[in-house]
Amino acid sequence: MQDKVLVVTGARGALGKGVAQIARSRGARVAGIDYAPSQSAATPDHIEIGGVDLSDAAQAKTAVDATAKHFGRLDALINIAGGFAFETVGDGDTKTWQRMHALNVQTALNASRAALPHLAASGAGRIVNIGAMGALLAGSGMGPYAASKAGVHRLTEALANEWKGKVTVNAVLPSIIDTAANRADMPKADFSKWVTPQELAEVILFLASDAASGVTGALIPVGGRV
């Protein structure tokens, strides 16, 4: 990660913070993009760009271009921004499906489109998306979320083929991530079985590294002990 320039979307969430922290500890320069307002001033190795709705293509391009201008280049895009909803198909609301598509598919699509010219110029460009093991076989109540994450899987595969030899594009597929929010939602679960943000971050950063130059189009389950 030494001297690599990474963009992390959803940077204020538990996973985004973990990825950014580990990457910076290994010498990377990191831009965090999030819908929430930024909380720190820009430095030579870190910049926060807040108030960005990545489901809007113009806002995504503005934020990504600002990152490339600040650091002079872009080597990797980590698409973590997203959302979750639990709702059955029959009793649910069409707006939930639209919201899940916007939060999970559209954000990754817009950020990727904005980043691809910069990543191709890097010579070692990487995109890492966040899919979901739950999108491989959707359970009850998982329809809107699983459908949107399945879209992320197909987006990953399509981009990997379209940019083969120029930019690698892969996705990690977590099970349940051990975050405070998930613990609050499922207080009776066995948290020890869940994948930790640190475990997931290690796989993400491997895929963003030079060591993963031969890996593209992969959907890698990171299930912890589930």
Image: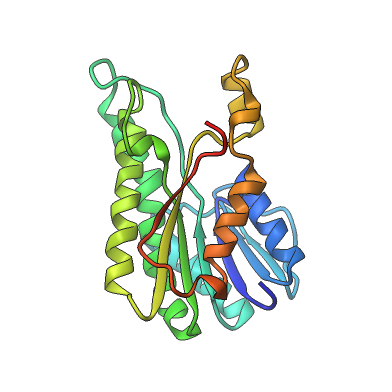
Q: Is residue 55 left or right of residue 123?
A: left
Residue occupying image coordinates x 65% and y 29%:
192
Q: Position of residue 210 (x, y in %)?
A: 56, 75
- In this picture the colour scheme is rainbow
Q: Nearer the viewer, residue 73 or 153?
A: 153
Q: Is residue 20 left or right of residue 88?
A: right
Q: Is residue 70 left or right of residue 75?
A: right
Quadrant in the picture for residue 218: bottom left
Q: Is residue 191 left or right of residue 86?
A: right
Q: Nearer the viewer, residue 188 or 67?
A: 188
Q: Nearer the viewer, residue 80 or 208?
A: 208
Q: Position of residue 198 (x, y in %)?
A: 67, 48
Instruction: Work out whether 145 lies above or below 117.
Output: above
Which residue is farthest front?
225
Quadrant in the picture for residue 225: top right
Residue occupying image coordinates x 33% and y 30%:
96
Quarter placement of the N terminus: bottom right
Q: Position of residue 70 (x, y in %)?
A: 62, 77
Residue occupying image coordinates x 39% and y 67%:
216
Quadrant in the picture for residue 87: top left
